[in-house]
């Protein structure tokens, strides 16, 4: 089942603690589960004041935005990009708060908005995970991005939501929200009401890996050698592997051939994984083959 979600992911960077001090906004438009458009605006806050702590976070300085337009000047363009979409952000109450404060500060009409939060979605999709910040979640899923750049953060946010939908086999964003028992947040001239959901105790399920399970390794991680060789087939978190493959796609443009018997995956699973990693599977070796995966030899039966 394809996760045919439609939404726009956003992220604000601010110049100071003032919620109306937006200095950068990123937006990523998703249609039918695919990123189809993206935009970024540099914004000159009013007053043109940046706190040192905020500069240390995002690296944006007053000189970088001194000649940029005010929020009110670019709002018509932003509004057209956002349309009537469900807005998605990580810690959405912050970004929606910046949007409302900026609209009010620049005497712009505040539209009725609906939004959801990838932090809340991630908590319910992967309850066994311990860290739900944008960077830890992105690292865990293999999403590479430059943190605290508004456009990069928006892309990471969109991919976290897409990963959650794929993980849950959801058909749409509405289906995912229904499965997770989450209600969208709403905002307007009256303020905002955050994303909400029925609270439930965390229950151990098949999604939680037992302590004895071999962990799935991410980049820059090295497994400790086992104390003794175990010939039994280890468990493979194939679903998480497939989700992560969609994002990193290191085999893009390469042709792969599998031979012999694979120990941890069936041939169909391995070829599906290779395809999601961006590769093209071939049945036989040829001049165009880039990667040969040699499994154990199988004995011919007369």
Image: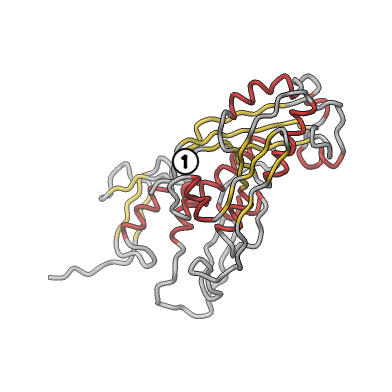
Residue reaching furthest to the bottom: 228
In the image shown, does 24 or 127 lie closer to the viewer? 127
Q: Position of residue 183 (x, y in %)?
A: 58, 49
Q: Position of residue 60 (x, y in %)?
A: 78, 33
| Residue on which the image places disc 1 | 33
Q: Residue 127, located in which quarter of the rendered image?
A: bottom right
Q: Position of residue 4 (x, y in %)?
A: 44, 42
Q: Residue 255, located in which quarter of the rendered image?
A: top left
* Quadrant placement of the C terminus: bottom left
In the image shown, does 200 or 295 lie closer to the viewer? 200
Position of residue 130 in the picture relative to residue 268 (left or right): right
Q: Residues within 10 Å of mark 1 (few under 14, many from 20)?
A: many
Q: What kind of colouring is applied to the model shown?
A: secondary structure
In percent of the image, x 40 and y 72: which residue is there?
Answer: 233
Q: Position of residue 258 (x, y in %)?
A: 32, 56
Position of residue 76 in the picture relative to residue 285 (left or right): right
Q: How many numbered discs?
A: 1
Q: Secondary structure at mark 1?
A: loop
From what the image shows, is residue 190 above or below residue 3?
above
In percent of the image, x 40 and y 76: which residue is there?
Answer: 232
From what the image shows, is residue 261 above or below residue 157?
below
Residue reaching furthest to the front: 190
Position of residue 198 in the picture relative to residue 266 (left or right): right
In the image shown, does 176 or 279 lie closer to the viewer? 176
In percent of the image, x 83 and y 36: which residue is there?
Answer: 18
In percent of the image, x 35 and y 58: which residue is there?
Answer: 269
From what the image shows, is residue 62 above or below residue 175?
above
């Amino acid at each position: 089942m394809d996760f045919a979600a439609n939404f726009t992911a956003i992220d604000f960077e601010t110049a100071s603690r003032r919620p109306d001090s937006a200095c950068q906004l990123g937006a990523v438009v998703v249609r039918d589960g695919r990123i189809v458009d993206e935009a970024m605006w540099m914004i000159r806050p009013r007053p043109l004041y940046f706190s040192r702590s905020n500069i240390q976070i995002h690296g944006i300085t007053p000189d970088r935005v001194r000649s940029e337009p005010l929020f009110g000047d670019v709002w018509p363009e932003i509004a057209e990009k956002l349309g009537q979409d469900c807005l998605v952000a990580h810690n959405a109450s912050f970004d929606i708060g910046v949007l409302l404060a900026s609209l009010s500060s620049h005497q712009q009409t505040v539209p009725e908005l609906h939004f959801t939060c990838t932090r809340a979605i991630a908590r319910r999709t992967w309850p066994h995970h311990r860290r739900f910040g944008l960077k830890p979640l992105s690292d865990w899923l293999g999403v590479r991005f430059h943190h605290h750049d508004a456009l990069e953060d928006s892309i990471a946010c969109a991919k976290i939501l897409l990963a959650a939908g794929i993980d849950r086999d959801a058909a749409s964003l509405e289906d995912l929200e229904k499965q997770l028992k989450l209600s969208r947040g709403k905002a307007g001239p009256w303020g905002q009401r955050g994303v909400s959901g029925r609270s439930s105790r965390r229950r151990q399920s098949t999604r939680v890996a037992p302590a004895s399970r071999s962990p799935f390794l991410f980049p820059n991680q090295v497994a400790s050698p086992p104390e003794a060789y175990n010939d039994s087939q280890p468990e493979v978190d194939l679903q998480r592997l497939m989700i992560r493959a969609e994002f990193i796609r290191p085999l893009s443009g390469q042709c792969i051939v599998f031979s012999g018997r694979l120990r941890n995956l069936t041939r169909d699973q391995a070829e599906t994984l290779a395809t999601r990693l961006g590769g093209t599977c071939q049945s036989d070796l040829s001049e165009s083959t880039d990667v040969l995966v040699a499994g154990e030899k199988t004995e011919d039966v007369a």
